[in-house]
Image: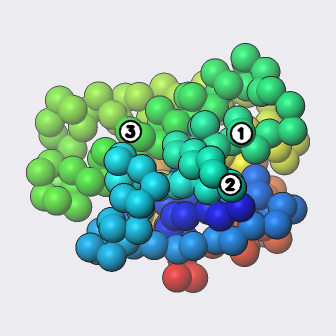
Amino acid sequence: MKLIGSTTSPYVRRIRLQLKDQDHEFRCVNIFTKEGQMEVAQYTTTGRIPLLVDDNKVIWDSFLIAQYLAPKPLALDLQKDLVLINEMTDAGVQLFQLRKFEIDVEDKGLFSKNNLRRIKNILSYFEAKKLVEWNILTQWLYCTLDWFDFRNVFKWRDDHPRLVSFYNTYCEHIKIKETEPRQN
């Protein structure tokens, strides 16, 4: 089994955490280079990461990969929460790209404001949720919160003390340290 992705992607990181005890190869690519784009294009037309290659199967999208790797089908409520985390991450990535490519650096546009609202609403949902177990849900949430800090996308700490406590509980976890995007 081979996982193709980058060390800075929150989508890839969550799959790396899920694969922690499975034998696999991690192939780091930079999708912003021609070489990285060509490698990814061998497996999918989406041009996106993560990609999981398992024998003759190629799976893209972290949600699909997570379902494929799960030892049993994911419960509907868990799937819904994972979709919320994906939505929040997507909104953050869009904000990051709008700023990076100098389209809406100050988040003044309607699209940026909508993404900020989505992030705030989803964070409020998870702030109210009991997060006590280190599992796929909390791993995904941690990866997104950490990516928000890493890329300075959204300042979530001031308004979400329970999420700060959750984050602080797991920030020293061995797999979190091993997948740390700032070391690369």
Q: Position of residue 66 (x, y in %)?
A: 68, 41
Is 136 positioned to the left or the right of 50 in the image?
Answer: right
Q: Position of residue 146 (x, y in %)?
A: 58, 58
Q: Position of residue 172 (x, y in %)?
A: 79, 69
| Mark 2–mark 1 distance (CA, rounded to whole Å) | 10 Å
Residue drawn 70% across and 35% down? 67
Question: Label 2 amino acid?
Answer: Asp
**Which quadrant would residue 132 be assigned to in this image?**
top right
Is 133 positioned to the left or the right of 5 in the image?
Answer: right
The residue that mark 2 highlights is 54
Q: Residues within 10 Å of mark 2 (few under 14, many from 20)?
A: few
Q: Earlier in the sequence, mark 2 or mark 1?
A: 2
Secondary structure beneath dot 1 equals helix
111 and 125: which is toward the camera: 111
The residue that mark 1 highlights is 68
Visible in this render: residue 145?
no
Question: Label 3 amino acid?
Answer: Ala
| Mark 2–mark 3 distance (CA, rounded to whole Å) | 30 Å
Q: Nearer the viewer, mark 1 or mark 3?
A: 1
Task: Name the residue at the front extreme.
Answer: 56
| Mark 1–mark 3 distance (CA, rounded to whole Å) | 24 Å
Q: Is residue 45 above or below residue 24?
A: above
Q: Earlier in the sequence, mark 1 or mark 3?
A: 1
